Amino acid sequence: MDELIIAGRSFKSRLMVGTGKFASNEAMVAAMEGSGSKIVTVALRRVDVDNPQDSMLKHIDPERYLLLPNTSGARDAEEAIRLARIARAAGCKPWVKLEVTPDPYYLLPDPIETLKAAEVLVKEGFIVLPYINADPVLAKHLQEAGTATVMPLGAPIGTNKGLRTRDNIAIIIEQATVPVVVDAGLGAPSHVAEAMEMGADAVLVNTALAVARDPGAMGVAFKKGVEAGREAYLAGLGKQQDKAEASSPLTGFLRDKN
Amino acid sequence: MEITFNGRPHELTAGTSIQELLDQLRLDCLQVVVEHNHNIIPRQRLAETALNDGDTLEVVHFVGGG
């Protein structure tokens, strides 16, 4: 498959994988390996000194994966900026998946706070990948602010509903000058294939892999979905139309009398 | 003296450094990031930064996320 390029760096996979909700670190690693992903997201939380846990980072080879910290849990720009700075201080490359989700029920991203945070973080030298609703105007504002991608949602996080925002994502893809990464709500390989067929540059999947009976095998299934969608997009899909168009000539039938 | 550690009150001896506190709590400084009164403290300065009564400390680490 052709390489994905974000902020001048190329990646051999167009499938990004989240690391949340897995039953074990082993299941997480199996999904990452099965998916062939090169970019994996992580979150920051307070340590729990009463329940010390093995660091999940020990299971992620930094030579093999770009660690993409997110700012999940941030309710406004200030909190998101704070989390991004902490992630960088942890030794991560200055890449950040910017998430500002003040609404705990649908986890929909706040467009105004996201744009504010993006402007600050870009100035501080971060490579910013903002999680947004599928709003083409907001996507334009963000790319003008200097974000490295835009990441419109297919459906709310963890819902597995697929590309409910399809029409707006099509407009974002048409207009974007930065890679479009469809994120959130993608629950099946057919969903990621659909996004890639439309011309999305990449997708991000977490819940669908984490909740699978076999996360490693599901990683492989999503990898195939992404590759099939991308290859079909590059090969050129036929246009949809209402009337039938026969695949064979409409002459020379047995009933024909000449 | 008392500080606020990750949102909860925490008693400790006056003059304790951040590194000493991390050691007491068995936290590996390579696995965490420390914010002291809202300022990120680089790892190399954890040992020289003393805690004072009323300080706020946030100690965070990476967890799974999407």
Image: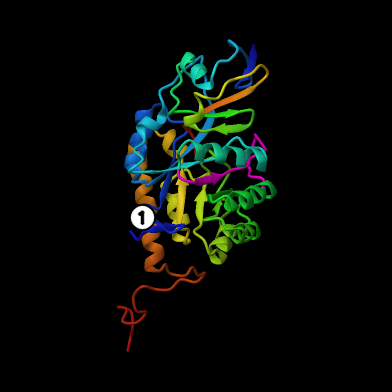
Residue A99's x, y, as percent? 59, 43
In the rendered image of this protein, does residue B15 appear above or below residue A193? above
Q: Amino acid at mark 1?
A: Glu
> Is residue A188 rendered to the left or right of residue A109?
left
Q: Residue at x 49, y 59 (%)?
A: A179
Residue B9: x and y in percent read 64, 14
At mark 1, the secondary structure is helix
Q: Which residue is mark 1?
A: A227
Label 1 marks a residue whose chain is: A
Q: Where is residue A252? Give x, y as percent.
A: 31, 82
Furthest-bottom residue in view? Answer: A258
Q: Residue B14 appears at what percent x and percent y? A: 60, 12
Which image quadrant: the N terminus of chain A? bottom left
- Tally the marks: 1
Q: Is residue A75 left or right of residue B47?
A: right
- Residue at x-position 44% and y-position 21%: A53
Q: Is residue A71 visible?
A: no
**Residue A253 among magenta residues:** no
Q: Is residue A42 visible?
A: yes
Above or below residue B50? Residue A254 is: below
Question: Which of the pair A229/A17 is nearer the observer?
Answer: A17
Q: Residues within 10 Å of mark 1 (few under 14, many from 20)?
A: many
| Residue at the image point whose x is 53% and y is 21% from the top | B18
| Residue A238 versus residue A36 in the image, above or below | below
Q: Is residue A101 on the magenta stretch?
A: yes
Residue range corresponding to the magenta coloring: A93-110
Quarter-of-image position of residue B10: top right
Q: Main secondary structure of the magenta part?
A: loop
Protein image colouring: rainbow
